[in-house]
Amino acid sequence: MKKTDIDEFYRRLSELNPEPETELQWKNEYTLLVAVVLSAQATDVGVNKATGPLFKVVDSPQKMVKLGETKLRDYIKTIGLFNTKAKNVIGLSHMLIEHHGGQVPQSRDALEALPGVGRKTANVVLNVAFGEPTIAVDTHIFRVSNRTGLAPGKTPLEVEKGLEKRTPDAWKGHAHHWLILHGRYVCKARKPMCGDCTVPDLCDYKAKEMG
């Protein structure tokens, strides 16, 4: 995709949704971190159903530690891998208290040192909570980037680096959410809705279905 096409690609997505937001529900930086950790290999809708009741009683690492792993499992048992995720959430809560004064750090290295937090999770927290122009490459962004020709790559990290390099600075703040939402609702995995797409003329996808 040419440089001018990339700029137009984002411009059109921004027209549809000027201020995109994560679909995960959160109250503060800590609850965002927990929600993103829980969202691994799970849907945002499923996570929100579990965290709705949870975040009414827990909104800090101190309260999470007091709640305990057993009770936390009861809240999140509808989410995939809930046993491992409960252990990680309790573990990261202890680390936040012991090493960061109970606050979520604004540092990629510090975030990735927390249990259950990888590069993608750290990128989401840095972008959503702290407004940093990071792009977390999930399955949707990986697919859209490769299918459209926006930033092809064989691995999520390769795609991330490509997006960082090719995305104009003016669009980097919201690029993460625009691409996720485009992949989730339009450029779907099994059958992309090319007829409803706002950027079909800029896309490299060969098997476009424009009906």
Image (cartoon, grey):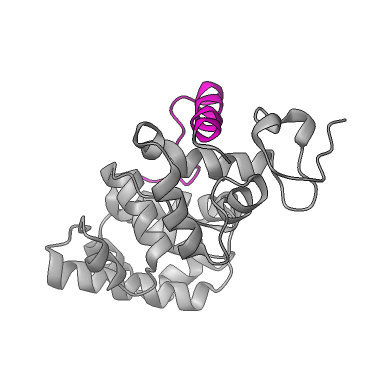
Report the magenta residues as a range. Answer: 4-26
Q: Is residue 71 above or below residue 169?
A: below
In percent of width and height, residue 49 lies at: 55, 51
In the image, is residue 32 part of the stretch drawn in magenta? no
Q: Is residue 78 left or right of residue 92?
A: right
Q: Is residue 63 above or below residue 24?
A: below
Quadrant of the image containing the N terminus: top right
Q: Is residue 195 left or right of residue 180?
A: right
Pick whichever, 197 or 98, lies toward us.
197
Residue 22 visible to the viewer: no
> Quadrant of the rendered structure where residue 200 is?
top right
Say which residue appears at 80% left-offset and 40% top-offset.
Answer: 208
Quadrant of the image containing the C terminus: top right
Pick whichever, 96 or 169, lies toward us.
169
Say which residue appears at 36% left-offset and 55% top-offset.
Answer: 123
- Residue extending furthest toward the right: 211
- Residue extending furthest toward the top: 15
In percent of width and height, residue 31 lies at: 34, 53
Q: Is residue 39 above or below residue 165?
A: below
Q: Is residue 50 above or below residue 130?
A: below
Say which residue appears at 54% left-offset and 42% top-offset.
Answer: 179
